[in-house]
Image (spheres, rainbow, N blue to C red):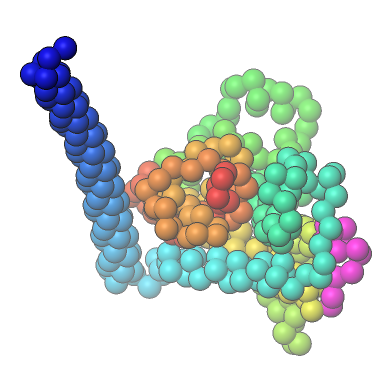
Amino acid sequence: MGLKQQVALVRAEQQQQEDKHQVDLQRRTDELMATFQARMNEADAKMAALATERDRQAAAERDQFARRIADLERVLMEKPGDFDLRLVSDGSLREEYRSLKRSVDTITFNLGPITIDRNIDATSFLEREGKGQERLFVKALVWAMILDGFFSVPYGFGALGPGNQGGPLFDLYRSWKTMLEGEGDGEQDAKSDETGPRGPLEQHEFGPFYRDRYANSWRSATFQSILSAATARDADGNIAVTTGIAKVVHNNRQRVQDNTLAMLKSVCSNHVSEEIQEELAAAMLRASELSIIFGAHRANVCFGIPKRGDAVEIGREFVDCQDGDVNRVTTKTVELPVLPALFTIGDGKNDLTSVFCVEQGEILPVGH
């Protein structure tokens, strides 16, 4: 091969290398531009989601203020004899709930060394999460017992406890409902007539409260009376447990307190200090009164909490119990439900459907 041919061959190889370099450079440039554009699109989507969430919250706040103004206008226009005995604001509900949260936090934070048996941790939460989450687990367990003990039935009736503890009030409500709507003719009613007392109220029996403002007025007035009786104090300032509905409320409160204390002793080698037991009694009293306030409020006041495995959007109704709302507007899978969110639905009068989150709940997400 001559010198000229060798030079031509080298130049050709050099040109090929340059062409390949240009192709690689263009490919890399295209990849970087695509990545940059994707990140820009992602950032734009997050900004749009944040703007939507901001607008939603602003609209919810406007609705809340409009409701408060309407309530104040109604109060100013009503005759003295028509005044609602207990206008429970969203703000007072929030403060009642926060006081209960502080009590539960005080209890779980000040417990001694904790040992969780497998029969308590039915979902093997601590096996997955390891050491360091015992207090969070106990906190979630205390809240589960509170919800089951006082809020398992809507519209305040949960304050009376499970089973037929609230029999006289249940019978009173059913008689009033029958007077309002007439005798039922469904299978449930026929079965009840055959077997005598109907027992606990069931979900389908709360229909009037979902659609009738006067039904909510009746409920509010009834539970205002229950609240007054259940919170009456003697000369020494202690809750005066007498008879009737106040006794039923007290018995249920004591039942939940005893069960919760037994659980705490089981995870603390049977040692729970007197201070914690006093705080537990205060927490149970707050929970019991709050459940009655749910009934005294004309709106449908309720707690909501997801189940393990549910998908929850962070920042709207629930926050991460460890990171707050840092990851807001992202959807997380629930590993451990910790705190319920507090809601009001409607106002019990003209609006019976609008949902407002009064206080966010907390969850521990998977892969936190």
Q: Does the magenta stretch include residue 45?
A: no
State the residue in front, 23 or 87: 23
Which residue lies most toward the bottom here?
Answer: 236
Q: Could one spot residue 223 in this view of the protein?
A: no
Relative image position of residue 180 (x, y in whole percent) = 50, 39
Q: Nearer the viewer, residue 343 or 75?
A: 343
Residue 53: give x, y in percent of width and height: 30, 51
Q: What stretch is highlighted in magenta?
A: 263-274
Residue in view at x 67 percent, y 67 percent: 104
Q: Can residue 196 be seen in this view?
A: yes
Residue drawn at point x = 84 percent, y = 75 percent: 273
Q: Which residue lies furthest to the right in this view?
A: 270
Horizontal arrangement in the rendering, residue 1 relative to residue 287 (left or right): left
- Residue drawn 43% across and 69% down? 91
Above or below, 110 against 68 in this view is below
| Residue closest to the eye, 278 or 107 | 107
Q: Quadrant of residue 69?
A: bottom left
Q: Residue at x 55, y 65 (%)?
A: 97
225 left or right of 129? left
